[in-house]
Image: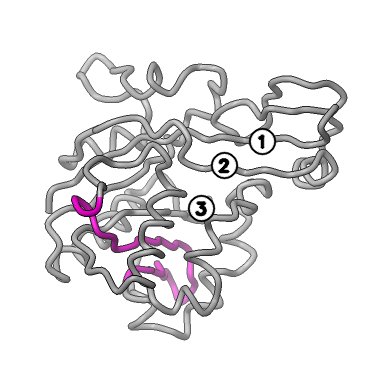
Amino acid sequence: MTLQIFTLRERPDLRAHVFGSELQSVWPEFMQHDTAAQLYFAPKLFDRYLDYAFAGVAEGKVVARAFSVPFAFGVDGRNELPDGGWDEVIRWAHDDQISNRAASAVSALEISLLPEMRGRNNSLQMLDAMKANARAKGFSDLYAPVRPNQKHLQPRTPMRDYAWALDDKGLPVDAWLRTHVRIGGKIVKIAPCSMTIVGSIAEWSRWTGLTFDRSGEVAIAGALAPVLVSLEQDYAVYVEPNVWVHHRL
């Protein structure tokens, strides 16, 4: 199936489909409870970013989506990519909007495809569209707090070890990191606390379908690192590491 890619500015009629249940469900439920996300995805705030949000359409159906965000970099103490990764770049962009500060770079946030669209270079097409869009808007740099797509199989492996593991060709062993590097992306640093999700034990049980019966580190499906559980304090915290990758445009 041929993939056609549009920004939501170009095709506002696709917005509801981009946030439809099929594409939402490609993510584990717990991933949909990051509070920083509301600074980008809350309906009135999201209107600011329609030029940076994409829908992938095949045979008349939305089968992929991608989100990115412009932000100011190299100003006001922002001389390094943040350890806070995904969460922090959204906060930076939100602060830029309310401060009327001009953006100087773009960060990728997400690329998602329905299962039947994977393995056909469609994720690369979405990434290429994101890069082309940033270039067309005059930006020279695209950054990405990459979520390695096979890291969930090794939740207890530190990201600093996983991200730098190479195959016999000198490329990352992780397929998504490898895709970025193959097209010129450079791994810059680890974002150790890229996404933080906090909830009560009852909330985590609802999000995962699990019964948490002990405190400590608990590995759950889809998580890149263990969830930290405290039955005594009645909460659990997930701190996800990502990998900052830089693409020169």
Residue 59, placed above or below residue 76: below
Q: Does the magenta stretch include residue 73?
A: yes
Q: Which residue is located at x 24 percent, y 14 percent?
A: 168
Task: Give the labeled residue for mark 1.
Answer: 237
Left or right: 207 with respect to 126? right
Identity of the amino acid at label 2? Thr
Q: What element carries label 2?
A: strand
Please indicate whether residue 67 sits to the left or right of residue 135 in the image.
right
Q: Do the residues labelled 2 and 1 touch (CB within 8 Å)?
A: yes
The quarter of the image holding the N terminus is bottom left
- The region drawn magenta spans 52-76
- Residue 5 can be seen in this image: no
Residue 116 has which mark? 3
Q: Is residue 10 magenta?
A: no
Residue receiving disc 2 = 196
Dot 3 falls on a residue whose secondary structure is helix
| Residue type (three-letter) at the residue carrying disc 3 | Glu
The alpha-carbon separation of the residues under discs 2 and 3 comes to 30 Å
Residue density around tag 3, few if under 14, some if 14–19, many if 20 or more, within 10 Å: few
